[in-house]
Each structure stands twice: as C-alpha cells, then as structure tokens.
Amino acid sequence: MVRQLGPSRAQSTSALRAVRDQCAPARKLFVREWRARSAPDGSPDRKQRGNGRPGRGPAAGVRSVLTGLSVAGQVFVLQVVIVLLLVVVAVVALVLQGRYDSTQEARNRSLAVAETFANAPGTLEALRSSDPTAVLQPRAEAAREATHVDFIVVMNTDGIRYTHPLPDRIGKRFVGNIAPALAGRNVTEEIDGTIGRLVQAVVPVKDGDGRVVGLVSSGITTEHVGGAANRQLPMVLFSAAGALVVATAGTALVSRRLLRQTRGLGPREMTRMYEHHDAVLHAVREGVLIVGGDGGLLLANDEARRLLGLPDDAEGHHVRDLGLEPGTAELLASGRVATDEVHLVKDRLLAVNQRPTDLRGGPPGSVATLRDSTELRALSGRAEVARERLDMLYAAGAGIGTSLDVTRTTEELAELAVPRFADFATVDLFDAVLGGEQPEPGTELRRTAFAGIRTDPPLYPVGRRIRFVPSSPQARSVLAGRAIIEPRLREAQGWQAQDLERTAQTLQYGIHSLITAPLRAGSLILGVVTFWRMENPEPFDAEDRALAEELVARAAVSIDNARRYTREHSMAVTLQRSLLPRSLPEQSALDIAYRYRPAQSGVGGDWFDVLPLSGARVALVVGDVVGHGLHAAATMGRLRTAVHNFSALDLAPDELLGLLDELVARIDLDEVDESDAAEGGNAPVTGATCLYAIYDPVVQRCSIARAGHPPPALVRPDGSVEFLDVPAGPPLGLGGLPFETVDVEVAEDSRLVLYTDGLVEDREWDIDTGLDLLRTALEQAGTSPEDTCRAVLDSRLPARPSDDVALIVARTRALGPDRVAAWDVPSDPAAVAEVRASVIRRLTEWGLEDLTFTTELILSELVTNAIRYGGSPIRVRVLRDRSLICEVFDSSSTAPHLRYAAMTDEGGRGLFLVAQLAERWGTRYLPGGKVIWAEQPLL
C-alpha cells in the first residue's frame, strides 16, 4: 500500500485520476445516468424528490422533472429548447426583414420606372401634342405590363391625369403630393390609394430649358412586392424539425456510447474497479511517479521506489530533496514533456516518459513512467556498432576508388579507416604496383599512405622502403594471405623484432594493438594494410579482424583497377611520346617553343609537328584525334606520318587537308567493319581536327587552313592579341566539303600560337569564354616563346587535365633583302651565261666562292630546261639561309623527271647532275606555274 503524506487524500486521488483517464473517460457521466435510472424508491435521491418543501413553485417542478431524466435526456431537452428559441427568433426576423425589403423594393422599382418613362423618347413631344392621352396611354400600359408595376400615370402640371390603368379615371386629379415634383425634384411616398396601400414615385418631365412641362408617376402595392419571408418560413420550420431529429439521434448515440464504454457496469461495479486501480498501479513492472505542480512527490509505486531507491517517506518531499541524480531530479521538477529519455541512475539506464496532468483541465503536475532499459541498451549498443561497421563498408564502396590513381586510392583507404575503425592506418605497396606492373613477392614494400588522429607517431614515414622480417605480422599476413591480429604489442616478440628501437618508441607512444591484412586482388598480393589502436583501451578482436578483411578486400579491387589503368596509361603515354617529335628540326624562319601535356584520365590523340619546306619556308601543324587510349595514339601517329608525306609534295594547306580528309575516311572504312561494330571495336576517326600553316620568311606571309580546329592566335609585336579569322572547315573524315586557305601578313617578331581544344574547352564554360581566358594569358605573357608557353600553361592548365593539351608558340623571323637575289631571264639560251655571271657575283658578295662551280652547273641545267621545255616568264631566285637555295620559276606545269640516260643518249643527264650536286631538290607547284629548287649545304 502507498502511504499518503502531505497533501490530503482527495488531492492524491485527483492526481491519480489523471493517470486513469484512459481507463474511464466517461465514468462520472455514466454513474450519474445509471443512478438516475436504477436508484430504488427508497434511495436518498428518490426521498429527496419525494419530500415536499414549502414554497415549491413551477421552477422547482421543472428542476425536479429534469433531475429525473438521464444525462442524455437532459441534453435532449436542452437541445429542443434551443432549437425552438432559434425558430422563433428566425421567424420574427424574417417577418421584419420581409416588410422592410418589400417597402424598399417598391420604392426603388417605382422610382426607376417613373424616371425611365419620363426620360423616354417621345414623352416630351406627346405632352405638347393636341391629344396626349391618345399617344401616352398605350405606351404607359405597355411599360406597366413590362415592369410589373400597378400603374403609370402621366399628368400635366395641374395634376390632371393623361393616362391610368382604369380609363374612367383619365382626366381626374392625381392623388398624391406633386409639389416637390413641380419644383423639379423626384418624390417617393407611401399612401393609401384607390387600389390599396401602395408606394408611388412622382418624377418631373422637363423640356430643353429645364422647365417642368408634365409629371410621371409610377406606383406599386406592397402586397405585390417581396414574399421572400413567406417562401423562407417553410424552410425554417423544416430546418427546426431536422434539428430535432438530429438531436434525438445524437442523444441515442450518446446513450449507446456511454453504455458501450462502461460495458454496462453499474455504480457499484465502477466503484469496485476504481478501488482496484491502486493494486494495479503497484503491480506493474514500470515505475510511476505523480509530481505536483510545486514539485512535490504525490505518489510513487513500488517499482519506482525500487528503481530510484526512494525512502519510505518520499511522498510529500520535493523531488530535488530525494537524493536523485541531478539530471533526473531536474526533469521531474520541470514537468516538461519527455519521451524515452535515458538517464543513468546508479548502475541502471532508465527510460523516462513524462507528461503534464493539466492538459485537459486536470490538476497541475506531471506523471512520469520509468522503465529499466539497461539490458536493452546493451543489445542496442552492439546493434549500433554493427550498423556503424556496415556504414563504413558502404562508405568504402562509395569513397574508395574515386580516381584511377594508385597512391590516391591508398590514401582514401587510410582516411576512411581513421578514426572510425583505428587510430592510425598505414598502407604499404610493392614498388611494381606503383608503376602499374605485377608485384613481385619477396621484394621490399614502400609506405604509400598514412592517416592518423595525430601526425607524429613513431611509425615508418610515407615513402620509406621497408623489408619486413619473417616474424613480423605484416610478413606473416602476406605469406598466409589473411588478416592477423596482434592484440597486445608488448607481448608480440615477432613484431618487436622488426625494429627494436622504433617498436619501443611505438609502445611508449601508446599504441598497443594492431591488425594487418594483405591487399589481395585475385591471386596477386599488392601490399599490406596495418591498422593501429591507441586511444581505445580494448584490443582488436575477431570481429574487428573480419571487418578489416572486408574493408581491405574492397579497397584491393580499386587499387588493382588503378594499377591496371596506370600500366595502360603509361603504355599509351610512351606510345604517344614516341610518335610525337622528340626534337625540332633546324630552320631559321621561326623561333619555336612547344608543350605537350597528356590527359590525367587517359592519353588522347593530340599531336603537333614542325616541317621545314623548300624556299626557307616552315610548316606548322597541330591536330586532335577524337577519343583516348592506344587507338587514338596509334591513329595520331598515322596522321602525323601522312602529313609528313603530303608536306613533301609542297602542297597548299587546303590541298593537304583535302588529302588528309580522304585518308581519314579510308581509315574509317578499313577499321570499322561489321564485326567491330557488333563487338564494340575501335571507334571511328571521324571528327579528328587539324590546322596546317606555312610561313614564308621572305615575304613574311603565313598561309593557314583548318579542319574543325580552334583558330590560331597571333600576338603582334606590340602585344595585342588577335584570333585569326580562318574558315573552320569540317572535321576530317566527313568528306564532300572543301577547305579554304587564308593568307595573313605577319610582321617580324610576331608570335603564332597554335593549340588543341583541351586548352580552351571545359565543362564549366563554353569555348568563347576559354578563348577570352587564353587572350588574357597571352597579353600578360613574356615576349619569348618559352615565356609564352609557361605563362599560358600556368594560367590555363588545370592540375588534373581531362583532355590532352598541345601548344606551339612560334616567333617569326624575316629573311632580309640582303640574303635574297632574284633575276628575270628572257626565253633565250644565250641568257644562261648572263645568269651564271650574275649569280657568281652575288655569291662572291656573300663570301660563298666555294659554291660557285656547283651553283653554275645547277643553275645552267635548271635554266636551260626552263627555256627549252617551260614557258615565259622565267625567274631565278637565290636564297642564303642555313643552306644555299636556288629556285627557277617558269609558267609551265609539267615537271621534269629524273632518269638514267643510256651510254648512247646525248641528253637526259642534267637532273642527274643536279641530284648529285645538291643536298635536296624538288618541284613546287604554284597557281601560275612551278618552281624547280635545289639546296646546297653551306661549307
């Protein structure tokens, strides 16, 4: 039993009732109704109703009748009275409102009809006619029937009627007040006319000068207006009847609900159940506390006393004075709402739920329930650990292997494990793995990644080459192919044998346990991962080992993928670099610097080249093959070789791109057959781009054509930057569309900038933005090609480029007039000697006397052939560059061919001599003819 101290028993019972509200929500109503129905004649209630008292009046009789009814009956009578009162009020309101609305409507309608008729066309003229009645009577009757008024009367200013619904009253005086109307105002009045109680309006009829020449009156009886109240009265009565029906049905439902909720129990049964609540309260396995509004403890059952360790006289004391934990005492004293709030009380974890008791008009205070959740908390703690481990494995699947870099992948593994699983984590890989090759067991490992809660543990640093002794857990793990635990490192002699000094420092640092697991990918062991524990005093256990094996197994797959990619990437880079020019050819027309940066994600098909041409000219070419990988690199090599071969023909840029376009189309046809398409073979080359430019230092002109490639940039000597307007042309391989060559005058010391799209295109902006950024970088760069390359790449190249970047910067030079000599030759064999003499004199001026003999022979043969087989005009030009260049131009498009002459042939040996004496020779076609040229090295 519970001792009740402090507050009275009534107060404690009131607080207890707040707890029991859910069990008996309608207890009081049911007891009253049951007693009203079942009390015997001799009960005190019947005696009270049967006792007559002096002065008992009608009110007392009504009270007696109501008291004899049940609660539902009393509610029903109250509802009937309210409905009747509402019906009476509604009827009175309807009658009054109907009368007012009828009068108001009659006034508005009569005035509107009178004004309309008075102002109607023809009314004024009819009043001025000789017989107004004949004109106005039909109109008035038609308007009356149309507007549903009782009469429309037109009269003169003396009140004599011209019109009336009753013809016998025409000519008689109008009944009503017309004085205001004669004064020009409208008048509305209520009168008792010849046709009953009516509302009439009188309106003046005015001429153009504003004089009143007649009057119009319209009237309507009030009984012909309104009637809304009469129409609404039945609805009000029907609504009242419906309300009574609803009240009756509601009373029946309430009675049935009370009986159902109390299960048909009478007052004695209800009282007995109420008295048993105390026993139930103390029998439950949850502690129950009732706290008053002032913080005093009103009631505590046996379970609450046991859980909280309350004394026997706890009731009546403030909860803060009971020696409870501060957090628990503060919660109970505050009375705030709490749901499953966990509090540590001595050695128990209690789940506390608290609700106020005054939410529905109850007494102030609160009710709290206590549940011992110590064992449940232990189970949930283990479940939480398992959930955290699953989360870590899920995070490993999403967070490890985000890049195809071996080192970065190992760093992601170490960062994920710390501090969620271990305090420190180290990853050691074989050197061959870092290079993309297969590991060689038995060799040294290199520490690749480290992560920890601190940065100064006495472990091997990153980059250190390590050879683990056979007794170390790392070596045993690699050999066995499974994870190994060293729960207590102070007792691990095999681990300490690795490095006695370093292991002693590690133990002194506080590291006491480790797990080491091999990085296994199929049959390959890539390295080993070690997890170290310091702050958690518990050593690693078997569950930790299982988690470490699963975590490392997932990471090993990503590391092996990165290793394979590194190998393929290295092969592609090697192939691509072998296909790109390793050094630039010697030439004097351009001062050139270049850069090539492969993509981080995969080698692409970007390429460039510098090709010396005849006549001291130089060709610059840059291109881009779609796609990445070995196929793109190999295709790039084929295109570069083709450009080399085509450039040897001394073709114009547009003609060379046309041949290259046909070549790409043939490559696509050869490589993409039906079997490749079905098996996902190599992608077609269609879409490759190329830009080809030829610079002539003699005339300082650059001829450019491009096939879908970004436009070249020209940096003027004054530092201004211009993107040359060269028609883009279609990408290579599409075919059917021609290319166009543009000639650009280029001043000496200008810089031509050729590049691939990886320098200007990005996912975050369009190519126009990239060109603007490149323009800014070129404007801020130095004047030398090397400075320009460095400035552009520093400002535009990202740390991990997604596409290849090729960049060429060529500063132009000029071949001055003092190094060029030219003569026009008449079409006469005798002119050959004169040409020889002029050339010898110029060679003497240049200090090249040693070349006079061979030059005479070469020019004699070339000029003679031009005179004999070519056409006018004929010109000779000699250039002094890195070599001595002799050129003979004629208007014929036929080229001589080198052949072997027989012993008996008189001719055919001239070109053979030229080929033997010159280092190089060839033919260059021009729009107006051809040029035969030969080069001799300067001695």
Image: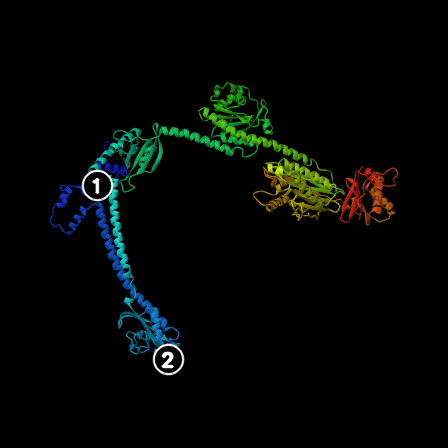
Q: Is residue 333 left or right of residue 802?
A: left
Q: Amino acid at mark 1?
A: Val
Asked where in the image residue 441 lies, by quadrant, the reply is top right
Q: Amino acid at mark 2?
A: Ser
Give x and y (percent) for residue 688. Answer: 65, 42
Give x and y (percent) for residue 452. Answer: 50, 29
The residue located at (36%, 74%) in the rendering is 139
Marked residue nearer the N-terminal end (1 or 2): 1
Q: Are marks 1 and 2 in contact (CB under 8 Å)?
A: no
Give x and y (percent) for residue 598. Answer: 62, 37
Asked where in the image residue 98 lies, by quadrant, the reply is bottom left
**Residue under circle 2?**
129
**Residue under circle 1?**
31
Q: Is residue 198 left or right of residue 645?
A: left
Other-residue count near label 2 (Cα within 10 Å), few / some / many at <14 / 14–19 / ≥20: few
Tell me the SS state at disc 2: loop
